[in-house]
Image (cartoon, rainbow, N blue to C red):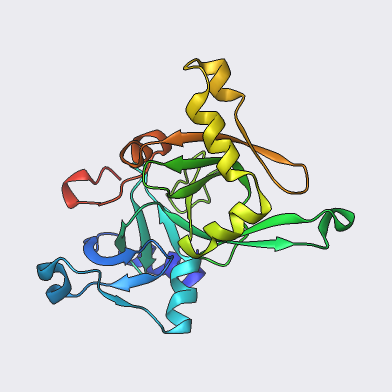
Amino acid sequence: MDEIVQQAMAKWPNVPHCYGWLALDRRGQWRMRDEAAQAAGTAGDPIRHEALLAFIARNYASDDAGQWYFQNGPQRVYVALAYAPFVVRLTWDAAANDGRGAPVLTDQLGRAFVPQACLLDEDGNVAFVGAASGGEGGGTSTPSAPLALLHDHDIDLLTQVSDLTQAFEIAQTSDDTADAKGAVRLHWRNGDSLPFATVHAGTLPQTYGFERDPQADNQSA
């Protein structure tokens, strides 16, 4: 978090939080939702200003209730999530691992996202469970297993560099036991693999500890 933001928080500790004005869409775009957009229930306008995007990225965090926000000086601007707190793009680094290649996931903040598992929901959305991370100070916390939605433009690439279709078929036909489900894996082209599971999108916030639509009456921090 920016030092100037921390100073503003200390100087003005009781600034009311802001809800409804900022959203993260399914393609990793930050969207500003003014009063007209909120009233109409529309997505809002994508933020294009590079300096503002970088500022949001440096000051994006979550509270103890799993509500994600942008710390704008002394004010928390809570973020409505279309799907998950992170959205990742996939590329394939063909030169990695002595030429065996490796998947590279980058989130909307421009940071590397290290996958620990792959999920496929009932609508064909692919998500990755991230590596465990701890809090970063400033009274904020991060989930032990953050969740990232794969940008839909990269699903075709995923099918080219992994056995996504086969993993789905195995998951659908495996015995309904923890051991059988736990044995299903997504295999990358280079031979590496990840645990794989089919899920229901509606269960993900509770499972991975985040809130898709923060509201003032849910605030506990």
Where is residue 105 shown, x and y percent of the image? 61, 58
- Quadrant of residue 38 within the rendered picture: bottom left
Q: Position of residue 218 (x, y in %)?
A: 21, 44
Between 91 and 62, the one lying in front of the other is 91
Determine whether 8 is above or below 177 in the image.
below
Which residue is painted at 56% across and 19% down in the image? Answer: 180
Residue at coordinates 42% horizontally, 48% vertically from top-left?
124
Q: Say if 96 sits above or below 184 in the image.
A: below
Visible in this render: residue 14? yes
- Residue 216: x %, y % from top left: 18, 52
Residues 1 and 120: in front is: 120
Residue at 85% x, 53% y: name it.
Answer: 97
Image quadrant holding the C terminus, namely top left
**In this orientation, does residue 132 appear?**
no
Asked if residue 152 lies left or right of residue 39, the reply is: right
**Residue at the right extreme, as displayed:** 98
Residue drawn where x is 46% and y is 61% of the image = 152
> Most extreme residue toward the left, as rendered?
39
x%, y% of residue 16?
21, 61
